[in-house]
Image (spheres, rainbow, N blue to C red):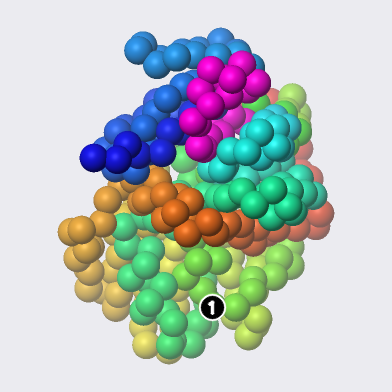
Amino acid sequence: MEQAPLIALAGIGKIARDQHLPSIAATGNFTLAATLSRNASLSGVPAYRSLDEMCAAHPDLAAIALCTPPQVRYEQARAALEAGLDVFLEKPPAATLGEIEALAALARDRDRVLFASWHSRFARQVPAARDWLADRTVRAVDIRWREDVRHWHPGQDWLWQPGGMGVFDPGINALSILTEILPGPIFLRRSDLYVPENRATPIAAQLEMETATGAPVAADFDFRETGPQVWEIRVETDAGSLLLHEGGAALDIAGRTIAPDPATGSEYEELYRRFARLVAARQAEVDITPLTLVSDAFLLGRQIPVEPFHD
């Protein structure tokens, strides 16, 4: 039996351990050959601190998944593409639009596969929501993405530094679903950013957007939710209401719960299956629309100081 392509994992933090490692093992689309990290490693897997050293030791390495914070991802991705590797980018794909556009151009020049992944688009009920909305008239959208940062992101100081995006780190998941399930562009009209006095990025945000046809889209993102955690998108249409909740894992249409496709795997398993298909077909997939909305939110944002945040 032919061995699956060899892949390396850069950044051995929470997301890599919780999602990437089990998904690589579960899908079998790739074989984990090495890790790249300054201060972490995995038992039984060769570990390196330098990309050049790793590539020299593993000349058959085909790809790398970058799970490092977005502030350092551009340099790593550029070096990996120049070394001849196909690249899987965690979300967001880069710290800025300029960086991801440059990476996309480099991947084309080097004939490499670049995959800007958006894991929430692979939640179990997102495809069903997209298909149902395809021939409906959207009248209004309301997004509520509220979670406790101390529970979900303990000690992740990079979130609060420029480029870390603060509450938009989970909020961009909602925007990735929004831009997947609604046809046509979404325009940012107003942004209120609630920034702790001792931090550089917002702990909460309220956005006003609209579709190309003028339907209002409101979003409420908050890292301070200590009650029930909420990740939901409600869409009012000419055929009734659609509620995508539990981060896209559950779907109600006109008050009726829709059963998910039992064949659908976890978000990250589906991501690795998609990446494998892209690698086999030698096709890139780089959609920057969620990052564009976040960028627009900062461009149009009204900063509102709030009390200091201490982790």
- Residue 184: say if magenta: no
- Quadrant into which the N terminus falls: top left
Residue pictured at 56% horizontal, 43% vertical: 86
Residue 100 makes an appearance in the image: no
Q: Residues within 10 Å of mark 1 (few under 14, many from 20)?
A: some
Q: Residue at x 36, y 32 (%)?
A: 31
**Image point 63% across, 22% down: which residue?**
51
Q: In this view, does 159 lie to the left or right of 267?
A: right
In the figure, is residue 5 to the left or right of 310? left
Above or below residue 56? Residue 101 is below
Q: What residue type is labelled 1?
A: Pro
Spot occupied by residue 180 in the image (x, y as percentages of width and height): 50, 66
Does residue 58 belong to the magenta stretch? yes
- Left-right relation of 301 to 279: right
* Drawn side of residue 77 relative to residue 171, left or right: right
Which residue is tagged 1?
183
- Boundaries of the magenta span: 51-71
In depth, the one of 301 and 274 nearer the eye is 274
Marks counted in the figure total 1
Does residue 224 sit above or below 248 in this rendering?
above
Q: What element carries label 1?
A: loop
User: Is 120 or 73 nearer to us in this picture?
Assistant: 73
Q: Position of residue 222 (x, y in %)?
A: 55, 44
- State whether residue 216 appears in this view: yes
